[in-house]
Image (cartoon, helix red, strand yellow):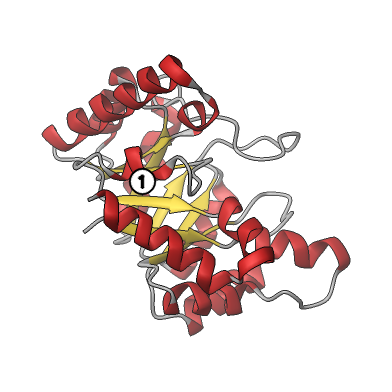
Amino acid sequence: MLRLGVNIDHVATIRNARGGDHPDPLRAAHAAAAAGADGITAHLREDRRHITDRDIDRLMAEIDLPLNLEMAATEEMLAIALGHRPHAACIVPEKREERTTEGGLDAVGQFDTLAPFVARLGDAGIRVSLFIEPSEPQVEAALRLGAPVVEFHTGRYAQAEGEERAVELKRLSDAAALAAKNGIEPHAGHGLTFDNVAPVAAILQLAELNIGHFLVGEAIFTGFEASVGRMRALMDAAR
């Protein structure tokens, strides 16, 4: 079964736009669970633009689903991850000036920087994932780093059209096959919607999709449980 991880960051974005406690990311996590999500993803950014430390505290204490903590490779985030011990930690690139994560982590160029983070998280029993582009060099770097999971950035696929989309889908499929062949569990996410998720979900080697912004936006019109539930159904149908 292809797992669905629901990213609740942008529930917090809406809350933080005005301040206060509403809408509550924890409530969104419970709604996602009720709709068939298999895990919750939350990105604790350096500038705390959406998810906050208190959100992470509450998610760890009050949800039954596994928490996937997205984090930059910094000592501050490492200390938070080691203090909370979430099920998984996905190391992502992060820049203050970006609106959202713009691409995959350069595991090749940042190999020496990433190695101690992967090792220390793994030693703490946290399942480490690297958010990378779907390419052979990046998968090979993840293998050498000892990361048990990679999450492929699907932004290029989501933005492409026509023949270009087919090329990006093959690139994703080939990278997933390479990862699985080498004992790395491949995940994928970024920019996936009701309209483009099926071809990605049909890639049999993929074990999990992480989807957030689109589901939060669609929830304005249909409700969060309905939004997550429809994505769940589309993923299941593709398999």
| Residue 173 pos. (x, y %) | 26, 29
Depicted 193 relative to depicted 35: above or below:
above
Residue 71 seen in the figure: yes
Residue 52 seen in the figure: no
| Residue 45 pos. (x, y %) | 64, 51
Q: Which residue is mark 1?
A: 129
Q: Residues within 10 Å of mark 1 (few under 14, many from 20)?
A: many
In the drawing, does residue 49 fall left or right of residue 34? right
In front of the other: 47 or 202? 202
Rendering quarter of residue 184: top left
Q: Residue at x 39, y 40 (%)?
A: 130
| Residue 146 pos. (x, y %) | 24, 38
In the drawing, does residue 139 fall left or right of residue 51? left
Quarter that holds the N terminus: bottom left
Check the image and name the residue furthest to the right: 18
Say which amino acid is labelled 1. Answer: Ser
In front of the other: 109 or 33? 33
In the drawing, does residue 76 fall left or right of residue 228? right
